[in-house]
């Protein structure tokens, strides 16, 4: 999975491309931890290029959201592909996480 | 000792026992079997050995964890000729309930949390119970999960999995009972669906319950 970092206003946007599975999720965890350590408090996960998210991937998303909230920040999730939207729906993530149609709306939300 | 040092199988066994009598709390047929099976799969997932999705369970690291119980299951997954759905492995491991339960009970007893008590009923029938020696572990996990249900915090992965497993096998309704929790049933339902293995435990039990009910109706 590729992780591309960009900025929209005060939010760091992580654009994810490929598959977020048990091999890729530790990489995402480390990325989130390094951003938190650098003082970043708003992260938008742009999922427009994410073809797949496994249970490990969902745990990474949940952990990121929890860490950011605990640090007084926020995580938001944008442009869910149909496959990711489906697993988010089954896992109740659509209810408990901040979901937006685009990265821009997530950054401004 | 932190509850996080216990495996999910140990936590399910601990929470599945009545803390006064040491007897198993009521669960649907095969409920405990599936819950323990799910617990083993969940522990391997958090240990980074396997991953799951809606189609299958995949081994991502075949190396042993050092936990004999988990490693026996891991070998089963590794040596499978092709990946299989989570539901398949729940069925396989549910047949190993006795081994999983006995191992978890032995560990909880060795930690001084439970003690083994053998009684005779009518001087003939053997009855084994596991009354609690140290209730701190159980209290700690109940308090933590209760806080999650009654509050609005995001759970960590471990707690999400545990609530999902407990709900799937219907233990949650015994552990978290009363009007305070009934008012938070929607929250519990949201937490319970956060983990796929826990959801599949619930689905397996529901499917079996429906099948048994239809058999009963046929014989009426």
Image (spheres, coloured by chain):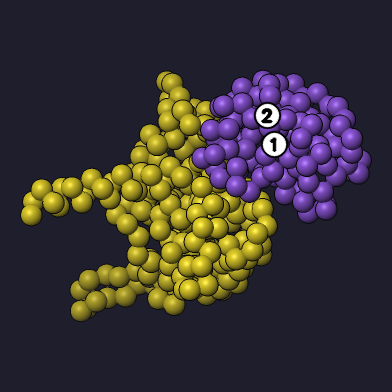
Chain colours: A purple, B yellow
Q: Is residue B210 visible?
A: yes
**Quarter the C terminus of chain B occupies:** bottom left
Pointer 1 local density, CA inside 10 Å: few below 14, some 14–19, many at least 20: some
In the picture of the structure, the residue carrying the numbered disc 2 is A79
Q: Are marks 2 and 1 in contact (CB under 8 Å)?
A: yes
Q: Farthest residue toward the left?
A: B220
Do marks 2 and 1 both belong to one polypeptide chain? yes
Asked if residue A8 is positioned above or below residue B171 in the image, the reply reads above
What mark, if any, has residue B220 been given in the picture? none
Q: Is residue A25 visible?
A: no
Residue B51 rendering spot, x and y as whole percentages? 56, 33
Asked if residue B169 is positioned above or below residue A55 in the image, the reply reads below
Q: Which SS class for mark 1?
A: strand
Asked if residue A10 is positioned above or below residue B136 in the image, the reply reads above
Q: Residue at x 48, y 52 (%)?
A: B165
Q: What chain does mark 2 sit on? A: A
Residue B24 rendering spot, x and y as whole percentages? 38, 66
Asked whether B218 or B108 is in front, the reply is: B218
Relative to B53, A64 lies left or right:
right
Pointer 2 local density, CA inside 10 Å: few below 14, some 14–19, many at least 20: many
Q: Residue at x 56, y 27 (%)?
A: A83
Residue B130 rendering spot, x and y as whole percentages? 42, 69
What mark, if any, has residue A100 been given in the picture? 1
Q: Residue at x 56, y 73 (%)?
A: B135
Residue B49 rendering spot, x and y as whole percentages? 58, 34
How far apart are the two marked residues, 2 and 1, measured between alpha carbons?
Answer: 7 Å
């Amino acid at each position: 999975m590729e992780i591309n970092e960009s900025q929209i206003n005060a939010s760091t946007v992580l654009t994810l491309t490929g598959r977020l599975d048990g091999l890729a999720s530790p990489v995402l965890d480390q990325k989130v931890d390094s951003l938190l350590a650098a003082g970043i408090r708003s992260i938008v996960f742009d999922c427009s290029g994410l073809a797949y998210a496994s249970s490990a991937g969902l745990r990474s998303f949940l952990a990121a959201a929890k860490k950011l909230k605990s640090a007084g920040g926020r995580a938001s999730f944008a442009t869910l592909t149909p496959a990711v939207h489906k697993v988010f729906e089954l896992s109740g993530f659509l209810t408990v996480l901040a979901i937006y149609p685009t990265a821009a709306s997530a950054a401004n939300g | 000792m932190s509850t996080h040092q216990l495996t999910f199988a140990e936590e399910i066994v601990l929470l599945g026992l009545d803390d006064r009598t040491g007897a198993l709390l009521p669960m649907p047929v095969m409920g405990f079997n599936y819950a323990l099976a799910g617990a083993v799969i969940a522990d391997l997932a958090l240990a980074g050995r396997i991953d799951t999705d809606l189609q299958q369970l995949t081994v991502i690291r075949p190396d042993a964890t050092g936990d004999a119980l988990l490693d026996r299951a891991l070998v089963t997954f590794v040596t499978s000729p092709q990946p299989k759905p989570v539901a398949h492995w729940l069925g396989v491991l549910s047949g190993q309930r006795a081994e999983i339960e006995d191992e978890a009970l032995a560990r909880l007893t060795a930690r001084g949390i439970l003690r083994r008590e053998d009684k005779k009923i009518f001087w003939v029938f053997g009855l084994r119970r596991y009354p609690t020696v140290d209730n701190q572990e159980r209290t700690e996990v109940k308090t933590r999960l209760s806080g999650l249900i009654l509050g609005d915090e995001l759970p960590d992965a471990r707690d999400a999995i545990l609530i999902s497993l407990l709900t799937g096998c219907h233990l949650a309704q015994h552990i978290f009972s009363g009007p305070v929790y009934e008012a938070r049933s929607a929250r519990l339902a949201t937490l319970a669906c956060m983990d796929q293995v826990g959801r599949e435990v619930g689905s397996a039990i529901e499917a079996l319950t429906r099948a048994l009910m239809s058999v009963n109706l046929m014989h009426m």
